[in-house]
Image: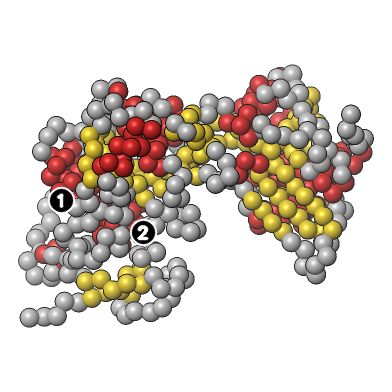
């Protein structure tokens, strides 16, 4: 009998090698390569043999024209969750939800399951990490114990699918988590690449064939990425990340992939004693603890999908006693900060080479768009000059390497949000001044970054009353 061939698979990225080695060549991680039997899991069995392979059948080809129906959705009733998913859970879809341990993934999904059950939907919650009694305690704390959510503590995929198919098809199935389930077709331990991939495939096949929406909960690595092979993210229809800082009560649910909706929407929640509470106006949350008279703070008018958000950007510029000054960034792209500093020094005469620069986005929020360049530059110049920026002014605009300030999209929505929160002035590229004038805001047109620096330097210093 031929000896079973073994392969070595990286548990971080899923790369396959012919022999064991201490460092993975694909992702660079150490001690992540584990030996797994090739006869089990993906690629094992009759389909992987050269003999006995069946002949392929001819599939029907159709044109692009024809009737296209809107994907049927299951609306949870939690507005922030429905916003991120694009209007609710699509029937027959598979979603992957990731987040740090203790961030509130299970709490959010338990609240969503209870809301759907109250709406008459059948929901099955499969827990692979906690016993039934532990899940019941969480349900009592979240005031969800009186709902008709069906609970199961099981980790074997075949047993889970047999239980789901034995009764009426559920509308939503929650698997908490995909790293704990295992299947009989793979011989490796639960949580390995082969087990995670095989288990996810089986559950996704069930979702497509039955029409039930399946949510897979995934652990994250120390870098913040969902643990396991990245191929799982390509297999599912949507990938959601649940983010938050340990010192803050709010949580952000961000979508990074969605086949049935936008990929840049966010939902904001606040963690309390009785679970997660929706935050309908995130701008007030991020601006709730502002110090209007402190230099180095600028309010940025940003966009997350279709939602405008105002957030405070804080900068601290201090003389450095080190040979190489420090550059520390929280909530923004560090190479982007280096570019803004270079433009300030090359085109505006702002010398920061002997200063430490610290940049922070208030509330632990993370900005991903280049429209924050102007607000960052204003905060840096304000901190260096010691002059506080006007408390009723909002900034947004993209800075080019030539020192010009370029307009950004959705200027009208950003200004509408600023006016709703009581801001009276806006500093923005000249191309967006017309939209600001129609909303009754005072406008400071900025064509180049040097104009902004001169405007801040010529402003009178504010003193405490």
In the image, taking residue 93 as reference, residue 340 lies left or right, namely right
In the image, taking residue 29 as reference, residue 301 lies left or right, namely right
**What separation in Å lies between label 1 and label 2 (alpha carbons)?**
21 Å
337 or 429, nearer to the observer: 337
> Which labelled disc corresponds to residue 228?
2
- Residue under the point 15% across and 48% down: 159
51 or 245, nearer to the observer: 245
Q: In which quadrant of the rendered image does the N terminus lie?
A: bottom left
Nearest to N terminus: mark 1 or mark 2: 1
199 or 256, nearer to the observer: 199
Quadrant in the picture for residue 426: top right
Question: Can residue 429 be seen by looking at this rendering?
Answer: no
> In the displayed structure, would residue 188 be above or below residue 264?
below
Question: Can residue 464 be seen by looking at this rendering?
Answer: yes
Q: In which quadrant of the rendered image does the C terminus lie?
A: top right
In the image, taking residue 326 as reference, residue 103 lies left or right, namely left
In the image, taking residue 440 as reference, residue 59 lies left or right, namely left
Q: Position of residue 350 (x, y in %)?
A: 85, 53
- Residue under the point 66% across and 31% down: 288
Q: Position of residue 206 (x, y in %)?
A: 19, 43
> Is disc 1 surrounded by few (<14), some (14 to 19) or many (20+) residues within 10 Å?
some
Q: Position of residue 35 (x, y in %)?
A: 28, 74
Label 1: which residue? 158
- Residue under the point 34% across and 79% down: 20
> Is disc 2 surrounded by few (<14), some (14 to 19) or many (20+) residues within 10 Å?
many
Quadrant in the picture for residue 362: top right
- Residue under the point 11% across and 80% down: 2
Q: Secondary structure at mark 1?
A: helix
Q: Position of residue 141 (x, y in %)?
A: 38, 33
12 or 139, nearer to the observer: 139
């Amino acid at each position: 009998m031929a000896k079973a061939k073994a392969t070595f698979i990286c548990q971080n990225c899923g790369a396959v090698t012919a022999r064991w080695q201490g460092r993975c060549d694909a992702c660079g991680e150490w001690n992540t390569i584990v030996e797994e039997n090739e006869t089990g899991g993906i690629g094992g069995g009759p389909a992987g043999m050269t003999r006995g392979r069946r002949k392929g059948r001819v599939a029907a080809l159709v044109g692009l024209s024809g009737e296209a129906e809107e994907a049927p959705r299951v609306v949870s009733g939690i507005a922030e969750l429905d916003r991120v998913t694009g209007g609710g859970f699509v029937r027959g879809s598979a979603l992957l939800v990731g987040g740090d341990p203790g961030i509130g993934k299970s709490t959010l999904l338990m609240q969503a399951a209870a809301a759907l059950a109250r709406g008459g939907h059948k929901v099955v919650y499969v827990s692979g990490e906690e016993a039934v009694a532990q899940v019941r305690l969480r349900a009592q704390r979240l005031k969800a114990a009186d709902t008709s959510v069906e609970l199961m503590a099981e980790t074997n995929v075949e047993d889970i699918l047999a239980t789901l198919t034995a009764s009426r098809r559920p509308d939503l199935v929650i698997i908490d988590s995909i790293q704990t389930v295992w299947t009989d077709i793979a011989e490796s331990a639960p949580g390995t690449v082969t087990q995670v991939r095989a288990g996810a495939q089986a559950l996704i096949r069930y979702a497509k064939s039955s029409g039930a929406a399946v949510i897979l909960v995934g652990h994250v690595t120390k870098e913040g990425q969902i643990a396991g092979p990245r191929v799982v993210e390509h297999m599912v229809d949507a990938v959601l990340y649940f983010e938050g800082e340990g010192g803050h009560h709010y949580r952000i649910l961000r979508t990074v992939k969605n086949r049935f909706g936008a990929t840049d929407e966010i939902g904001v929640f606040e963690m309390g004693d009785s679970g997660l509470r929706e935050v309908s106006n995130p701008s007030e949350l991020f601006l709730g603890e502002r110090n209007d008279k402190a230099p180095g703070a600028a309010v940025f008018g940003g966009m997350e999908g279709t939602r405008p958000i105002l957030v405070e950007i804080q900068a601290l510029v201090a003389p450095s006693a080190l040979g190489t000054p420090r550059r520390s960034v929280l909530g923004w792209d560090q190479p982007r900060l280096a570019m803004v500093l270079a433009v300030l020094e090359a085109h505006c005469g702002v010398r920061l080479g002997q200063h430490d620069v610290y940049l922070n986005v208030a509330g632990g929020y993370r900005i991903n768009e280049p429209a924050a360049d102007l607000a960052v530059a204003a905060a840096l110049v304000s901190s260096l000059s010691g002059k506080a920026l006007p408390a009723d002014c909002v900034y947004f605009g993209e800075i080019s390497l030539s020192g010009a300030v370029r307009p950004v999209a959705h200027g009208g929505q950003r200004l509408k949000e600023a006016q709703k929160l009581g801001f009276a002035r806006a500093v923005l590229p000249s191309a967006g001044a017309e939209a600001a004038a129609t909303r009754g805001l005072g406008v400071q047109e900025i064509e180049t970054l040097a104009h902004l620096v001169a405007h801040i330097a010529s402003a009178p210093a504010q003193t405490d009353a």
